[in-house]
Image: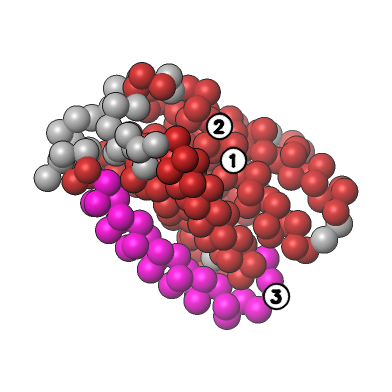
Amino acid sequence: MANITNDPQILATALLGGILPSLLWLWFWLKEDEKKPEPKGLLAGVFFLGMISVVIAVPIQQFVRSIFHSYASDIILWATIEEIVKFLAVVVMIRKSYFDEPLDWPIYLITAALGFAALENAMFLIKPLALGQSTVSLLTGQLRFLGSTLLHTVSSGIFGVFLGLAFGSTKAKKRLYFFIGLFLAITLHSVFNFFIMGEAGNEIFRALGFLWISAVVVMLLFEKVRRLSGEN
C-alpha cells in the first residue's frame, strides 16, 4: 500500500482534487471584497499556512485521542483543535497593521480554512484513488468529502464575522466577540462531525442541509460586515 500511495500521479491527482474546490470557494469570497482586495501574496501565504495547519493539527488530535479515548473528544476536541490552528495560521502570517477594516478578518480566516480543507481533502482522496475507486463511488459512498470544504469555510467564516463585527470596538467587546465566534465555530464543526462520524448514514443528508443553512447565515452576516467596511 505504501508503494501505491507514494505514486506521484496519485499524489498529484489527490492534491489537485483537494485544492481545486478550495480555490473555487476562495474566488467566490474574494469577489465579495473587490473594492479593497487583500494583497495576493498575503492571501497565498495564509492559504499555504492553512494547509500546513493540517500537519500541526493531526498529531495533536492523535495525542488527544490517546489521552481521552472517547467519542466526545473526537467530536468536540478535534473540532476545537482545528478551529484554533486555522486562527493561528492567520495570526502568524498577518501583522496587526494589515487588519484595517472589518472585512479583513472573515476574508483571511476563510482563506486559511480553505487551505486547511485543501490538504485535508487531498489526504482523504489518496486511499480511494489508490484503490481505483471511481469518482461516483467516492462522492456517494464518502459524503464527508462533499461537506468538508464548506464546513471549514462556514465555521471559520462565522468566527471571522464576529471578529469583524467587533472591529474598532473596546477590548472587552473584542474579547467577548472572539469567544462567541470561536464557540459558534466549534459548535457548528462539532455538530457536523457528530453526524459524519456516526453510524446512521441517513443523518448525513440532514447534516449537509444544516451546513448549507449555516452557509446562508454566514453569507448574510458577511454582507453586514461588508457594509461596516464601507463596501456597498
Secondary structure at badge 1 equals helix
Image: 105 above or below 94: below
Image spot of residue 229 (x, y percent): 21, 38
Query: Which quarter of the rendered picture does the N terminus lie within?
Result: top right
Looking at the picture, which amino acid does disc 1 mark? Ile
Looking at the picture, which amino acid does disc 2 mark? Leu
Looking at the picture, which amino acid does disc 3 mark? Glu
The numbered mark at residue 88 is 2
Q: Residue at x 30, y 37 (%)?
A: 102
Give the residue number, with chain letter if any, for mark 1.
Answer: 84
Query: Which quarter of the rendered picture does the C terminus lie within?
Result: top left
Is residue 48 among what the camera can see?
Answer: no
Tell me, yes or no, whether the two marked residues, 1 and 2, touch with CB atoms within 8 Å: yes
104 vs 193, left or right, is left
Mark 3 Cα within 10 Å, few/some/many (few <14, many 20+)?
few
Q: Nearer the viewer, residue 6 or 177?
A: 177
Tell me, yes or no, whether the two marked residues, 3 and 1, touch with CB atoms within 8 Å: no
Query: Which one is earlier in the sequence, the residue at label 3 or at label 1?
Result: 1
Mark 1 Cα within 10 Å, few/some/many (few <14, many 20+)?
some
Which residue lies most toward the left here? 232
**Alpha carbon separation for disc pair 2 and 3:** 33 Å
Q: Nearer the viewer, mark 3 or mark 1?
A: 1
Image spot of residue 130 (x, y percent): 65, 48
Image: 106 above or below 73: above
